[in-house]
Amino acid sequence: MPAFTFEKISPPARRAPAATAVPKKPRSVISQMIERIAERRARRALLDERAVRRDDRPVE
């Protein structure tokens, strides 16, 4: 017969989501520059795609 037993202790319940408690880190200058370039490239690609679609319409 064992002399002692282990008791399972459950972790405390979370009261608020962890995502709201963590403040957002400021972005570095390099990552901001890359994000701007990517946004401009995406906009340009979208505009080019729209222009191609207009050109593909049949002439009546």
Image: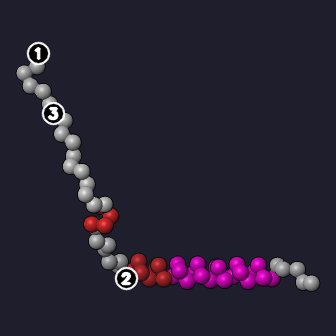
Q: Which mark is residue 1?
A: 1
Q: Which mark is residue 45?
A: none
Q: Secondary structure at mark 1?
A: loop
Residue 2 magenta-highlighted? no
Which residue does the numbered mark 2 point to in the structure image? Answer: 29
| Whole-percent x, y for residue 35 in the image | 47, 79
The CA span between labels 3 and 1 is 17 Å
Compared across the picture, whether 31 is left or right of 12 comes to right
Compared across the picture, whether 41 is left or right of 16 comes to right
How many residues crowd around disc 2 within 10 Å: few (fewer than 14), some, or many (20 or more)? Answer: few
**Looking at the picture, which amino acid does disc 1 mark?**
Met
Tell which tag, 2 or 1, sits nearer the viewer: 1
Q: Which residues are magenta?
A: 37-55
Pointer 3 or 1: first along the chain: 1
Which residue does the numbered mark 3 point to in the structure image? Answer: 7
Tell which tag, 2 or 3, sits nearer the viewer: 3
Find the residue positioned furthest to the left.
3
**Looking at the picture, which amino acid does disc 3 mark?**
Glu
**In the picture, residue 43 is in which quadrant?**
bottom right
